């Protein structure tokens, strides 16, 4: 078994998910594993782009400063600081790392978006 902080270095996404979900039984345990993935494998703070799907054309630069919360419906929420200095909690699947596209932070966010969007990670009744 690989340490959580080393999972982003595994080249194959399927293998990364196998490592993450080895002891998970159902959606809520997978979401808990994702929270651990964020807290153990990411380095805060970092620059990101935030795109809010509820606001057409919305895109802004933010600084991601840490994990805020985990919600069964909204998933992993990250604390961000906007350019104007205001803080906000943002759903992690709305953030993209700026710059280093192969960094551990970028891999974690990409894996999370894949879990949410392609694997129906936050779909009610998934279990």
Image (cartoon, helix red, strand yellow):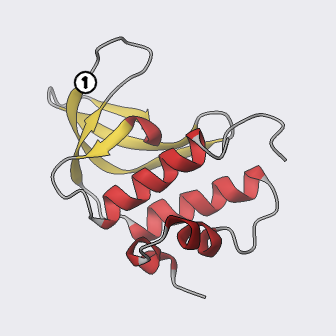
Residue with the mark numbered 1:
59
Q: Is residue 95 left or right of residue 60?
A: right
The image shows residue 65 at horizontal and vertical percentages of: 30, 50
Residue at point 75%, 50% (across, down)? 27
The image shows residue 125 at horizontal and vertical percentages of: 84, 37
Figure label count: 1
Specify few, some or many for label 1: CA neighbours under 10 Å numbering under 14, 14-19, or 20 or more. Answer: some
The single residue placed furthest to the bottom in the displayed view is 1
Give the secondary structure at mark 1. Answer: loop
44 vs 27, nearest the viewer: 27
The image shows residue 68 at horizontal and vertical percentages of: 46, 46
Residue at point 80%, 42% (across, down)? 126
- The correct choice, above or below, for 91 with respect to 46 in the image is above
The single residue placed furthest to the top in the displayed view is 56
Q: Is residue 12 left or right of residue 44?
A: right
- Quarter of the figure with the N terminus: bottom right
The image shows residue 81 at horizontal and vertical percentages of: 25, 37
Q: Is residue 67 left or right of residue 118?
A: left
Q: Is residue 75 left or right of residue 127?
A: left
Residue at point 57%, 73% (across, down)? 15
- The correct choice, above or below, for 115 with respect to 82 in the image is below
1 vs 83, nearest the viewer: 1
């Amino acid at each position: 078994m690989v340490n959580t902080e080393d999972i982003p270095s595994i080249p194959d996404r399927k293998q990364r998910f196998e490592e993450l979900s080895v002891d998970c039984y159902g959606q809520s345990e997978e979401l808990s594993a994702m929270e651990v993935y964020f807290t153990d494998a990411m380095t805060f703070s970092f620059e990101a782009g935030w795109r809010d799907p509820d606001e057409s054309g919305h895109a802004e630069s933010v600084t991601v400063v840490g994990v805020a919360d985990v919600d069964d419906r909204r998933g992993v929420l990250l604390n961000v600081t906007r350019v104007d200095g205001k803080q906000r909690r943002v759903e992690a699947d709305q953030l993209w790392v700026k710059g280093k596209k192969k960094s551990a932070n970028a891999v974690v966010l990409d894996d999370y978006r894949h879990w949410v969007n392609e694997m129906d990670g936050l779909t009610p009744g998934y279990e």
